[in-house]
Amino acid sequence: MFSRADLALYNRDGQLIAVVEVKNKLGTSAIWAAQLRRNILAHGGFQNAPYFLLMTPDRIYLWKDAGIAPVLTSPTYERAAQDIFSSYFDQSAIEPSEVSGAAFELIVAAWLENLVRAADKPEDLTSEAIWLVESGLLSAIQDGRLEYEVAA
C-alpha cells in the first residue's frame, strides 16, 4: 500500500513525474531530509517517480532518479527557498516562521502551478532556481498537471 503524497506532478501525457512532500519545518538539513525520505519509503513509500521533492519554508530538497528503496540517500539538489518563495510570502503578508502547514502547502502549490503552466520560463528564473532546468524537472512538468493529496 502506498502513502499519500501532499502533491504530485504529472507530465502532459499523464505520467507521474514528481512526488512532493511539504513540511512546515524550519532549520532542516540534508541529513534530516534524507532520513525523512527514507522513513516515508520504509512505511509504504510511493510509486516510483523520476523526482521526489521535499519542500520546507526555508529549504528545498530534490532527488532525481533515486528509486524507492528505503535507503539513506542524499538529495541530488538542495537549495535555499527564500528566492523562490519570498514573493509568495510577501503577497500573503506571512512570515516563513509564522506560516501554517496548510498555507505553506498552498504557497508550494502556487509555485509549482506556475512552473507547470510555464509562467516561469527558463530565462526568467533566478540563479537560485536554475537547478530546475539543470535537473530536467522544469521541462518534464511543463504543460502537465498538479494534483493535491494523491495516492502516489
Image (cartoon, rainbow, N blue to C red):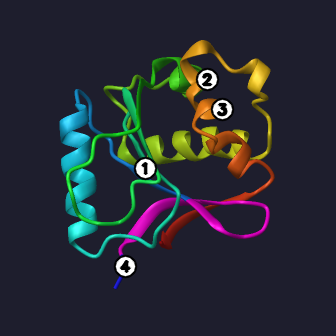
Residue 12 is a magenta residue = yes
- Counting residues from the start of the chain, the first of labels 4 and 2 encountered is 4
Mark 3: secondary structure = helix
Residue kind at label 1, given as amino acid type: Ala
Q: Residues within 10 Å of mark 3 (few under 14, many from 20)?
A: some
Q: Of the residues under marks 1 and 4, which one precedes in the sequence?
A: 4
Report the quarter where the N terminus lies: bottom left
Magenta stretch: includes residue 144: no
- The x, y position of residue 107, in whole percent, is 54, 39
- Residue 25 picture quarter: top left
Give coordinates of residue 99: x percent, y percent: 38, 34
Region in magenta = 3-17
Q: Secondary structure at mark 2?
A: loop
Q: Residue at x 53, y 17 (%)?
A: 83
The image quadrant of residue 98 is top left
Q: Amino acid at mark 2?
A: Ile
Kind of residue at disc 3:
Val
Of the image marks 3 and 4, the number of the one nearer the N terminus: 4
Is the residue under label 1 in contact with that under label 2 (CB below 8 Å)?
no
Q: Residues within 10 Å of mark 2 (few under 14, many from 20)?
A: some
The residue that mark 2 highlights is 130
Which element is circle 4 on? loop
Image point 37% across, 79% down: which residue?
2
* Relative to 69, residue 106 above or below: above
Q: For mark 1, what is the residue?
A: 102
Relative vertical location of residue 34 with respect to residue 85 in this rendering, above or below: below
Q: Is residue 41 left or right of residue 136?
A: left
Q: Where residue 2 is drawn, which disc sits there?
A: 4
Alpha carbon distance from label 2 to label 1: 27 Å
